[in-house]
Amino acid sequence: METVRILVVDDEEGIREGCKRALRNLIVRLPYLEDDYLLEVVTARDGEDALALLQQHDYDILLLDNKLPGMSGIELLESIAQSDREILTIIITAFASLETAVTATRRGAYDFLTKPFSPEELRTAVYKAAKHSILTKITRRFSAEKKKVRFQFLSVLSHELKAPIAAVNGYLQLLQTHAAGENISAYDAIIARAIERLDGMQKLIYDLLDLTRIESGEKKRTLSCTRPFEIARRCLETIAVEAKKRKISLYLEGDEQATMNADSTELEIIFNNLLSNAVKYNRHGGSVTVTITADEKMITFTVRDTGIGIAPEHRSRLFKEFSRIRTKETGPITGSGLGLSIVWKIVHFYRGTISLLESIPGKGSTFQVVLERGQISDDMTTKGESDHGTHT
């Protein structure tokens, strides 16, 4: 449990002790936050003591008597304002005159309590100030984290693009200087490698666009009655060209008629990423099998490959952004490190799960996605069947 630190400054011992008793064990709960906040109260008898305590610790709320011996409450408030401390001040005053209120507000006072006040009035004022302080801290923390994430994002992006850009530049220079002679066919391998690098950069950019749209909420979702089997078939046809180059066999089996309430574009992203990995990390002459099953509430996609597999120590990083497993087997293979993290985010839209069911190094991996089918109305079923007919 986190704490909200409160400093009570009053020359009357009864007020100081009364505030401590009234605020003892008071817990601040905000319905949209997981953590509760406990109030921690410290007291000071005058402005000088308060300044000494403020030098030693940070406080979130200051309960400050306006009439103090020596330094007045307004003078203490002005001193705090000059020090740029982040603290909410509640002025305690025996008479709330307009002049006092204006002066205190200009010095940064947040609220006022007029003596005599009841324990309930005190708790209400402090509770309001505590909520404001907590939300201000959280907002500031989010802002700092946002800047940090943006910096990390740009750092990773520049790192991921630097190598392929340098490679393509090198290949173009070889072409420009005719380094392989005048025979055009001698440049086929160079051109193929350049295209491969450009394809990798294109995939990174597309993945970044998908991730940005999903996380920003700008991607419009169109839910309709959708047949995942047909979407999987189309995605397999797309990946078939790359699979054929390496003699990888593709199989699709399971429930052809199963439907779900889904955005077809999101299902395509799921299948495309899983199938791309299954082919990319497969062995020459291997296979990829997609199986679709369904019950009354859930639909399951299983993608099984005969590829290089994933060692146990690497599995915890699978669904993290920009996380690529670097081994001697994966070193030559290009990728953004975003595909599975994008799939993970989409899967959670459907209150589903994605998991690595099994993986044996050198023999292959099996990924499983389980999604809620959702409610499908008669109108959606009719629309879905009509859409299905346009794809066959």
Image (tube, rainbow, N blue to C red):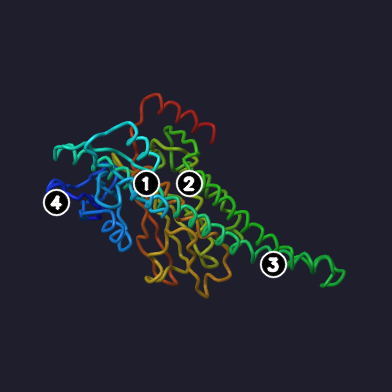
Residue 22 placement (x, y as % from top left): 13, 45
Which residue is depicted at the point 39% across and 69% down? 360
Residue 26 placement (x, y as % from top left): 17, 47
Q: Residues within 10 Å of mark 4 (few under 14, many from 20)?
A: few
Q: Which residue is mark 3?
A: 167
**Looking at the image, do the residues carrying marks 1 and 3 touch, with CB atoms under 8 Å apart?**
no
Where disc 1 sits, the SS reads: helix
Q: Residues within 10 Å of mark 1 (few under 14, many from 20)?
A: few
**Mark-to-mark CA distance, 1 and 2:** 47 Å
**Mark-to-mark CA distance, 1 and 4:** 31 Å
Q: Nearer the viewer, mark 3 or mark 2?
A: 3
In the rendered structure, find residue 136 and report the number of the disc placed on it: 1
In the rendered structure, find residue 232 and report the number of the disc placed on it: 2
**Looking at the image, do the residues carrying marks 4 and 2 touch, with CB atoms under 8 Å apart?**
no
Residue 386 placement (x, y as % from top left): 48, 28
Q: Amino acid at mark 4?
A: Glu
Q: Nearer the viewer, mark 1 or mark 2?
A: 1
Quarter location, residue 174: bottom right
In the rendered structure, find residue 13 and report the number of the disc placed on it: 4
Decide if residue 220 is on the left or right side of residue 80: right
Residue 373 placement (x, y as % from top left): 35, 39
